[in-house]
Amino acid sequence: MLKSLFNPSPIWYPQGLACIRIFVGALVFYHGLEIFQPSVMETYFTWEIFGAPAARFWVYFGKTSEFLAGISLMLGLFTRLGALAMIGVLSYVTFFVGQGRFWYEEQHSFLFVLFGVLFLFTGPGTWSLDNRLFKKKA
């Protein structure tokens, strides 16, 4: 057991990646569920950054993107598209809404950006609909 901790080879790599993908997807999905809570959505419009005329559209667009990206990641369906949506929306939250303070106040949203980059590069891992639907047959 101790020997495997010092071995540079991956341990349970595709399954571990899939577990992380599913868990991160559930968290992003949970954030996106706010789109179905009108009182919560209304509080966003009191924020100074969302004072522009098109702000209502962009807030709903962002929350819808979070909701769909979460579903995408949980199911492992169109994983890279879900990852791109997550990267885009949460980068905006980190660098514009949070004024780029990813090292302190906006760590939460920035970590989702990093997870999005991870899944963009690695794909879904195992236990995904992408694998079942798009994997080349040998």
Image: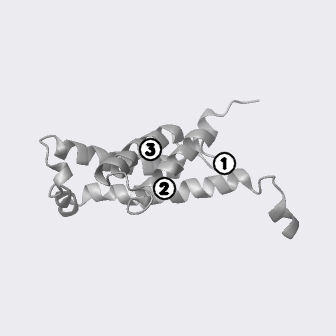
In this figure, which residue is indicated by the disc labeled 3? 87
Q: Are marks 3 and 1 in contact (CB under 8 Å)?
A: no
**Residue 125: % across, % down:** 65, 47
Which of the image's four quarters has the N terminus?
bottom right
- The amino acid at mark 2 is Leu
Which quadrant holds residue 38?
bottom left
Compared across the picture, whether 59 is left or right of 123 comes to left
- The amino acid at mark 3 is Ile
Compared across the picture, whether 54 is left or right of 32 comes to left
Instruction: Give the mark nearer the N terminus: 1 vs 2.
Output: 2
In this figure, which residue is indicated by the disc labeled 1? 126
Compared across the picture, whether 14 is left or right of 65 comes to right
Instruction: Give the mark nearer the N terminus: 3 vs 1.
Output: 3
Q: Are marks 2 and 3 in contact (CB under 8 Å)?
A: no
Residue at the image point whose x is 39% and y is 46% from the top = 91
Q: Secondary structure at mark 1?
A: loop
Q: Are marks 1 and 2 in contact (CB under 8 Å)?
A: no
Q: In 3D space, how far apart are the residues under numbered discs 1 and 2 (Cα atoms)?
A: 22 Å
Label 3 neighbour load within 10 Å: few <14, some 14-19, many 20+: many
Q: In 3D space, how far apart are the residues under numbered discs 3 and 1 (Cα atoms)?
A: 22 Å
Q: Secondary structure at mark 3?
A: helix
**Residue 69: % across, % down:** 43, 47
**Residue 102: % across, % down:** 42, 56
Residue at the image point whose x is 18% and y is 57% from the top = 47
- The amino acid at mark 1 is Thr
In this figure, which residue is indicated by the disc labeled 2? 111
Compared across the picture, whether 67 is left or right of 61 comes to right
Q: In 3D space, how far apart are the residues under numbered discs 2 and 3 (Cα atoms)?
A: 10 Å
Instruction: Please say if 6 is above or below 135.
Output: below
Residue at the image point whose x is 62% and y is 53% from the top = 18
